[in-house]
Image: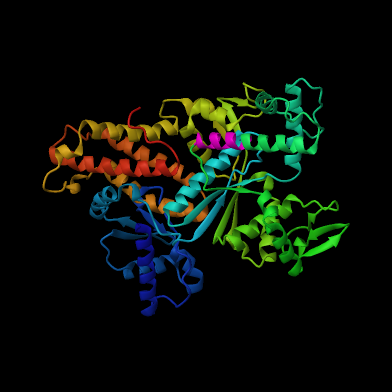
Amino acid sequence: MINNIVESLLKVAVAQAQKKGEIPLSELPDIALEWPQNVEHGDYASSLPLKMARSAAMNPIKIAEIIRDNIPLSKEIESVVVAPPGFLNFKMDSEWMKSQLPEIISKGSKFGETNLGNGSSVQVEFVSVNPTGPVHVGHGRGAILGSTLSNILSFTGHKVQKEYYVNDAGNQIDNFSRSLWVRYMQALEFDEKMPAEGYLGNYMISLGEDIANQFKNEFTEKSDASIKSIGIIGMEWVLEKIKTDLLDVNVSFDNWFSEQSLFEEGTYETALELLKSNGHTIEREEALWFTGSLLGDTRDSVLIRSTGVPTYFASDIAYHHNKFLERKFDRVINVWGADHQGHVPRMKAIMTALDLNPEKLDFILVQLVTLRRGDTTVKVSKRTGDMITLAEVVEEVGADACRYFFLSRSPDSQMDFDLELAKQSAPENPVYYIQYAYARIASILRDFPVDKLKKETSPDLNLLKEKSEQNLIRQMLRFPEVLDSVAAQYEPHHLTHYTLGLASSFHDFYTNHRVIGVEEELSRARLTLIQATQIVLSNALTLMGMSTPEKM
């Protein structure tokens, strides 16, 4: 990647200048490269001289000039320019840029792959909706973010496992089971009342009717056994619905992990004993507490209630014991709703209590989604009057629009999803704009296959002299860097912005320049250019879990 080349050149130049005594010896700060907004300023900008100025007790412009003069010659770099107040601007060599097009085409679906992860194992746990109801639109944002991040982590050299944590234990499951038994009984025309904390959604009525139709009077006896059986059937059906709804938006998992298994297989007891032996529990108010306040949390937390029933927090401890100490993942990323923010320091404290490195546990907190139709906020499902499900949104706007729009904003920012915009076949809709770029290239290559213009000699890529042509190449070469940045920072929204920019660069080129109907050698060069563009668009869309339509 070109950014790695630039960083290497800077390190060599600083070391050479220090060796010659032109810059005082000191530890080299982090080299952070940026893409200048104005391409006339170069392709990469470094503020390294500004960072070095204080420790070197020198003017940053002077440091920049010294570094520039010590940068070795490189086929990839055409020029290095010093800019106030102390930047170094690098411009890529245009001939070298053009020479990369055949490499993009040769790598095909593997272009953009890197070895950032170096084979490290990463578990990404996301969605994890309780198996008590359908996936709503808010869950969809975390689902799509988690699946896209997993795709990118795999593409950048990580060994990834995607996991859904099935919360099939605890009070919520008891409430669900009792609520569903009542709906089942009501479907059979028995006079049963919903419990105070029951699940009141219309989907429960439908689920109760389905069970009544299939099992008739099999569970009409009001007993713990009947209620438990109804609950198990209901959870299985809900989970199948969740799986179907997620698959419809191209989200799948490598593993569905049962919370109940933590208790059945002894992980809960093992984790609890480890906490006790490490001195991180205390008995207080007839309950067992985790002394998290001594490990960075704001307070202590109950592990086992005075009734002897473990809390959800205790299950989470056992679950993370399983992740790190039994399955031995190098890193774990939990994609949670923003309402779990207070739980983060608690889990970091638990990592310390389990003798694990808290830095190996990361969290992505996903904010809420507001659905709109233009200026109007959509609050409930038109179909049922309940919450709006992910399946309803997918049915209305399609999976591709769901994925792109949910990915388009940073997860820590609330987002508005305009359903009307998502359905438009117009440039204002970024999904249409990007996929139309791909389909337009496919049309050209279909009508005028590159094979028809192949000769013994390679295309003369030096004929690609137009500004829009070089800008398009520049955008393509940045693709691996974008993926590494997304993988390092857990910020998939940058890929949506990159892909939109690449599509824009293509449309700009195509609007102003013909591919077919020009001099043959120029046509061959431009066909090579758009072939490469199609590959990068395809790879980006695939990583985002979106389709690549050949016709639109």
Please provide percent x and percent y for residue 472.
31, 44
What's the residue at 45%, 45% (across, down)?
495
Q: Is residue 242 magenta?
A: yes
Which residue is situated farthest in the left direction here?
456
Q: Position of residue 502 (x, y in %)?
A: 37, 41
Residue 233: x and y in percent read 66, 35
Residue 277 sits in quarter: bottom right
Position of residue 224 in the picture relative to residue 431 (left or right): right
Residue occupying image coordinates x 34% and y 34%: 437
**Residue 199 visible in the snapshot:** no
Residue 220 shown left or right of residue 68 in the figure = right
Q: Nearer the viewer, residue 437 or 225?
A: 225
Q: For the view shown, which residue lies furthest in the top direction?
A: 189
Front residue of 59/290: it is 290
**Residue 367 sits inside the magenta stretch:** no
Q: Quadrant of the C terminus?
A: top left
At 39% across and 71% down in the image, what residue appears? Answer: 14
Q: Residue 531's image quarter?
A: top left
Check the image and name the residue furthest to the front.
Answer: 218
Q: In this view of the protein, can residue 469 be seen by the observer? A: yes
| Quarter of the figure with the N terminus | bottom left
Pick the residue in front: 504 or 122: 122
| Relative to 226, residue 455 above or below | below
**Which stretch is magenta?**
238-249
Query: For the stretch drawn in magenta, what is the main secondary structure?
Result: helix
Q: Looking at the image, how many numbered discs can be counted on the residues?
A: 0
Where residue 413 sits in the image (x, y, percent)?
59, 42
